[in-house]
Image (spheres, rainbow, N blue to C red):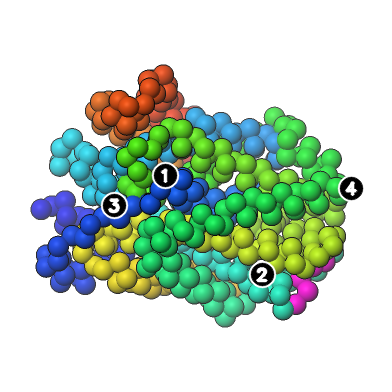
Amino acid sequence: MPGSFFTGTTFLLTGGLFIMANESVHNQAPAKRSGFATALGALIATLGSAIGLGNIWKFPYLTGENGGAAFLVLYLLATFLVGLPVMISEILLGRAGRANVITTMRKLSPSPRQPWWLIGAAGALSAFLIMAFYTEVAGWVFAYVVRSLTSNILSTDPQVTLQTFNALVSDPFQSLLWQWVVLILVGGIITFGVAKGIEATTKRLIPLLFILLLIVDVRALTLPGAGAGLAFLFKPDFSKISTTAALIALGLAFFKLSIGMGAMITYGSYWKDDQNIPSTTLRVVLSDLAVSLLAGIAIFPVVFTYGFEPAAGTKLLFITLPAVFAQMPLGNVFIFLFFLLTSFAATGAMVSLVEVLVAFANEQFHLSRKAATWITVGLLALVGSTAALSNSTLAGFTPFGKTLFDLYDFVTSNVLLPVGGLFIAIFVGWVLKPEQVIAQLTNGGTLSNHGVVRVFLFVVRYISPLLVLVVLLDSLGVF
Ligand code: TRP
């Protein structure tokens, strides 16, 4: 079968499991498929995938780099006109296919000749590249958790907090060590399975994260620079809108909502049959947005109070937060809690990325979940090390003028995810039979969602693909 040959080859490139898997392909009965235990659990686990470093680290630093409120406006447009419809599309595909992303796309495509499974294959590549840099940033977060216990990382002097951060990222040994700690933890959770590992962990932690963010916000809002910080975040200066900003806002929407590479197809395959897809997805998107805004409100008042640079880039979170906590009673305790919860949020997100690869290896090659997980983790450590060392040993290696860390980040958010999302929208809007879409969105006619379905179909056919296409072509300089 040419299909499975290509899938296998692709996975060899992206995952390297082909040879080992071939040995065990046909001699085991497929296991009964697991899923999330409850509807609330499915909602929270999906939220656990969406909420992560994208909200707490990436959103504030990109907003800072791209001009504040005007960027937020672009981001909101991208979220509701592209992000939400693509996310609904992925969840409905997943629940209709009830399998890993590649098998799902094969099952649902109208003819085996049409290579829609390539969306899944490209997704596997995205998962590797995202994990490569994500585990590094998560490693910094973990390192800050431990350091907040063992030493004093708080200071209102920007020079001092910057030095603390630089000392960490420029040390190759520490960078690799923390990345491995992160990978082993993620692997451990995944081996526990979908309901016991993923669902149970996130359900406890997401509410705590909200509460802690609120506490930090109260402190930030009572700083002298709060007004300037809020104005930066909420008062748009439309001269700051540019092609680049539009592409970055779109990429951020994809990244933050975990869409464009099959994570939500995989998670959708674990959703329950009686779950209302449009309304649950909307709740995920709104909660995800709330967490980003809370993170922005925590950070920009600090930036403007202590003279940090809003455009400080990837280090923004790590150099500003120690300053806000330095001003708080029990700051040492709170910064520990804050980074701890951020590490949990990051973990929930990483679990969803790795789950895409593990579900595929597990179902396609009949590897046990354990074997699939640890082989994947080993490969991730290999690819990830090139990102982990990009601030030290490999700092001089800059293809396309970017370090490998920045390159993986740029290529995934600004190319692979939007292109993946474009094809997912086209597939759901134009290729899948509308009856199938309607059946999923109304749960076989038991929900009276017909207005919603009509709006959804219109947006996913005409608006989302067109917007993604225009932004991508524009950034290539076509117009
Ligand atoms: N959304 C997560 C965050 O904001 C990151 C993430 C998890 C992701 N799974 C993904 C990004 C799949 C893209 C695709 O941190």
Q: Secondary structure at mark 4?
A: loop
Work out whether mark 1 precedes mark 3 in sequence or the reverse, and give the earlier one.
Answer: 1
Q: Which residue is mark 1?
A: 39
Q: Amino acid at mark 2?
A: Tyr
Is 372 on the left or on the right of 297, as rendered?
left
Q: Which element is circle 2 on?
A: helix
Decide which of 137, 366 is in the foreground and name it: 366
Q: Write the residue at 41% across / 19% down.
A: 451
Q: Is residue 266 in sight in this rendering? A: no
> In the image, what residue occupies the spot 89% across and 47% down?
224
Residue type (three-letter) at the residue carrying disc 4: Pro
Residue drawn at (38%, 66%), measured in percent from left and top? 192
Disc assigned to residue 100? 3
Magenta-tinted stretch: 151-156
Mark 2 or 1: the one toward you = 1
* Disc 1 residue type (three-letter): Ala
Residue that mark 2 sits on: 144
